[in-house]
C-alpha cells in the first residue's frame, strides 16, 4: 500500500447539474483528502494536452466541445492507493455500463457526459496535476 495523489475533475455536466458536492462528498467519505482545488474553464489547447491520447480519434471533436463547454472543478486528492480507489468510485467510462453505487453509474447515461475525470495511473496523475496546477 502506498499513499498516492491523483487528479480529479468534475466535468462541465457535473458542475451544471449541481453534482460538485456529491462528487466531493463521496471521495471524502471514502477517506481521501482534498489537497488542492481550482475552478476554471478548459480551453481547446488545455483540452488537447489533457486528452493527448485521444486527439485524432473519431470522438475527439465531441469530447473537446464538451470539456470546453463550461467551468470544471479541478482537484488534487491524496490517500492510500488514491488512483485506483478513485477510479473505482467513479465507475467505468460508459455510464450505461457503470455499476449502480458508482458516480457514473448513479448519475450518468451518455458516454461523453460522464460527470467526472480521474487519472488512470500515478504517472498520468503527475502529468495531469502539472497541467492544471503547474
Ligand atoms: P476515462 O475518462 O474513463 O479515463 P478515456 O480516457 O478512455 O476514459 O476517455 C476519456 C473521455 O473521452 C471519456 O471520459 C469519455 C470520452 N470517450 C471515451 N471513449 C469514448 C467513445 N468511444 N465515444 C465517445 N466518447 C468517448
Ligand atoms: Mg482516461
Image (spheres, helix red, strand yellow):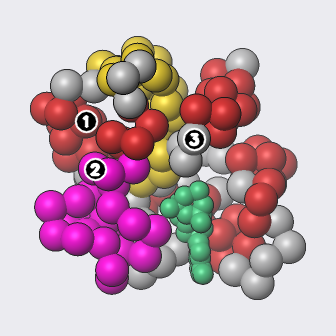
- The residue under label 3 is 121
User: Spatial distance from mark 1 to mark 2, Cα to Cα?
Assistant: 8 Å
Provide residue 35's location: percent of width, then percent of height.
41, 15
Q: Where is residue 23, by image quadrant?
A: top left
Q: Is residue 60 magenta?
A: no
Mark 3 vs 1, N-terminal side: 1
Task: Please tell me whether mark 1 sits on a helix, a strand or a loop.
Answer: helix
Graded by Cα atoms within 10 Å as few (under 14), some (14 to 19) or many (20 or more), the crowding at tag 1 reads some
2 in relation to 103, above or below: above
Provide residue 34's location: percent of width, then percent of height.
34, 21
- The residue under label 2 is 89
Left or right side of 108 for 38: right
- The residue under label 1 is 27
Q: Are marks 1 and 2 in contact (CB under 8 Å)?
A: yes
Graded by Cα atoms within 10 Å as few (under 14), some (14 to 19) or many (20 or more), the crowding at tag 2 reads some
Residue located 43% across and 76% down the image:
94
Residue located 70% across and 65% down the image:
64
Q: Is residue 37 visible?
A: no
Residue located 39% across and 66% down the image:
92
Q: Is residue 90 magenta?
A: yes
Which quadrant of the rendered structure holds the N terminus?
Answer: top left
Magenta span? 87-108
Residue toward you, 2 or 117? 2
Mark 1 lies within 8 Å of ligand 1 (Cβ measured)? no
Left or right side of 134 for 85: left
User: Spatial distance from mark 3 to mark 1, Cα to Cα?
Assistant: 17 Å
Which quadrant of the rendered structure holds the C terminus?
Answer: top right
Q: Where is residue 106, by image quadrant?
A: bottom left
Residue located 33% across and 40% down the image:
85
Task: Please tell me whether mark 2 sits on a helix, a strand or a loop.
Answer: helix
Q: Where is residue 33, by image quadrant?
A: top left
Amino acid at each position: 500500500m502506498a499513499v498516492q495523489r491523483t487528479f480529479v475533475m468534475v466535468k462541465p455536466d457535473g458542475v451544471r447539474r449541481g453534482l460538485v458536492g456529491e462528487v466531493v462528498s463521496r471521495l471524502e467519505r471514502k477517506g481521501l483528502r482534498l489537497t488542492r482545488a481550482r475552478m476554471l474553464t478548459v480551453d481547446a489547447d488545455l483540452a488537447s494536452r489533457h486528452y493527448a491520447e485521444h486527439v485524432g480519434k473519431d470522438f475527439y471533436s465531441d469530447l473537446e466541445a464538451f470539456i470546453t463547454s463550461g467551468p470544471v472543478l479541478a482537484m488534487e486528492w491524496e490517500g492510500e492507493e488514491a488512483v485506483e480507489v478513485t477510479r473505482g468510485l467513479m465507475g467505468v467510462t460508459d455510464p450505461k455500463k457503470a455499476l449502480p453505487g458508482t458516480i457514473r453509474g448513479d448519475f450518468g447515461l451518455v458516454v461523453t457526459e460522464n460527470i467526472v475525470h480521474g487519472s488512470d495511473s500515478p504517472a498520468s496523475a503527475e502529468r495531469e496535476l502539472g497541467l492544471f496546477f503547474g
